[in-house]
Image: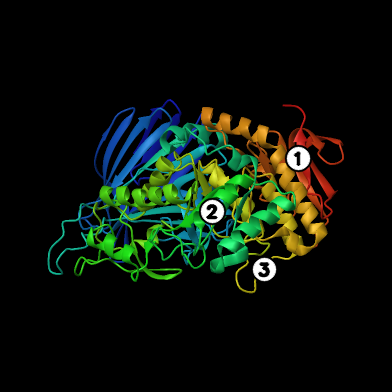
Amino acid sequence: MRHELHSPAGTVSFDGTGRMIFAHEGRVVLQSLGAVAHAYGTDFPITGVANADITERHARIHFTTTRPEITLRLELEATPTGFRLSWSGPPHLHAVRVEWQLDPGRPWYGMGERIFQHWPLDAAPVISDPFEPIDHGRDGTLNIATPFWLNAAGAALLLEEGDGELAVTIDRAGDGLLQITSREAPPPPNLGFDERYAAPGPSLTSHVILAAHAPAAFYAALPLLGRPTAAPPGDLFARPIWTTWAHYKMHVTQRDVTDFAAQIVSRGYPYSVMEIDDRWQRSYGAYVFDQRKFPDPRAMVDELHAAGFKVTLWTPIFFDPTDPAFSVAARRGYLVRHPADGSPYLVRWWQGYGGVLDLTNPEAVAWWLSELRALQAETGVDGFKFDAGEANFIPPDAICYAREPRRRYADRYTEFVADHFAYTEVRTGWRSQRRGILFREWDKWSRWGIDNGLHSVLTQALTLSICGYPFVLPDMIGGNAYQSEVPDGELMVRWTQLSALLPTMQFSVHPWQYGPEVDAICRQYAHLHTGLAPYLAELIEENLRDGTPLVRPLFWHAPEDEKALRCDDQFLLGARYLVAPVMRPGQRQRDVYLPAGVWRDYWRGALHQGPAVLTDVPAPLDQMPLFERQDG
């Protein structure tokens, strides 16, 4: 049995085994091996068709499996951009897994942040179980996750939201597959031990988008993916953000903040926001300053405003059980609750244990906003740096006001932030592409590599862009300087150079502590970034019009160029600038690949015709290879 369905974007052909072949303009761009039923650690593959109802644009099929009582249902329908596939299983089936072949169509991109942020995504095996926003998952999953995958051939996959827990693997053990699993929805957390739960059965619905190449598929996916209709304030792009964390950590005081600001000004660095990070407040969840460390916060904020800084304060969603603010939130039912007795669930986070604000409760959200607004009115601060919000901080058995998969907590968080604050940032997201705020990369370690070091700043910016997050905020220049892993002057310079050609910059480690040469180079690149402000404003307007990313992979304007498709150490800022940062210590020259076009060496003025590989391009410490397009 072989059938074919047609849509305006292409065709899909399928047989009685559930295998599917997707083509765009006669060219195969994606293949699926179908689905597998799973229960009690056992896979039950499809064996045939029980019944089918098939037309030219719609199919409804019941597949049999190796267990007669287990069937899988597939509903397949044409859409303007491709096809919608909905797989489902019977009640009490534990999971359904859909298997996609990585070939043809490699390489692949998307999915979100990872500790080892390889580019392309399938350059190394990927395991994400569960697949949801996680703060430092043991399998490498990180804070901004999105169920969106894109291949070079022009096919994209986007999951619809469901209630089951998700898991994803890519090329696990070299199997050449993208496997997406949806498990049955969990029972209510307050279900009695002996009570029966009528699970509805697992389901997994995907949109398959078909287009000529990867950028075209990205644009076709945007109406389903969502995109921002507003942008953060322009000064967040035009001038660097400065934050207290990496240098002062939790010991920060009012004197530290004002001294830090004075040094920034006196040394001639541009600036936009001063972020006062962790431990400015009395306790977590209490929106009042620690009077011992900050005796006169209003005077401090006034002084910073007079110098030209906006001021934001770091805040998470946790409440210290020893503070009166916890008691207020607990008494009013504003915290996530434990199923045993309904008391606040104390969850472990990086600063100990605390209650978690229940963002599914409208009254809790309104109260939290009133606390933040009261602090703003009292002190004059302009906004907040919002931290945490990942799914792993919501225990699986927690009771919330609304019952929903815990991964949605991240999007509720970003919605709250975007609705109420302009001078702000978040570091988590789940289907949050429509929020016009800065999304910060996860906390970087002070090292060079793709293992959450300097190289991953680039590959993570590319990944967030291809996932539909245009307003990328790289983490602190030089990393977080944790314990004995601190940046040296060379790493500080190379990190500054890369960040200068990204949409936003964020300093925290003091560049001047490394001596006059490093100080001068970092200041030079901070001003280079400031000089790009008009161009960045153009890119932001372009994004708001049609969704085009600000940070673009090298293939964006050369989508069939194999070298560009796999290049992981260069990027484009808009269409004009090609950036080739230095990613290894001691490196003073590097090879640069130029895709099609005429390119001018930014530093030397020489013109080059692409596609071409330039070998041994000079990269002295004060220069990052940079090229400007001349023909477009």
Q: Are marks 1 and 3 in contact (CB under 8 Å)?
A: no
Point out residue 582 in the picture as x, y percentages from the top left corner: 75, 54
Q: Which residue is mark 1?
A: 594
Q: Quadrant of residue 243?
A: bottom right
Label 1 CA crowd tier, 10 Å (few <14, some 14–19, many 20+): many
Distance of label 3 from label 2 (alpha carbons): 33 Å
Point out residue 630 in the picture as x, y percentages from the top left corner: 77, 29
Q: Are marks 3 and 2 in contact (CB under 8 Å)?
A: no
* Among the two numbered marks 3 and 2 on one chain, the one whose residue lies closer to the N terminus: 2
Q: Which residue is mark 3?
A: 486
Q: Quadrant of residue 286?
A: bottom left
The answer to whether residue 419 is above or below residue 127 is above
Residue at the image point whose x is 53% and y is 27% from the top: 545
Distance of label 1 from label 3 (alpha carbons): 34 Å
The answer to whether residue 14 is above or below residue 72 is above
Q: Helix, strand, or loop for circle 1?
A: strand
Label 2 CA crowd tier, 10 Å (few <14, some 14–19, many 20+): some
Point out residue 345 in the picture as x, y percentages from the top left corner: 29, 67
Point out residue 143 in the picture as x, y percentages from the top left corner: 47, 56
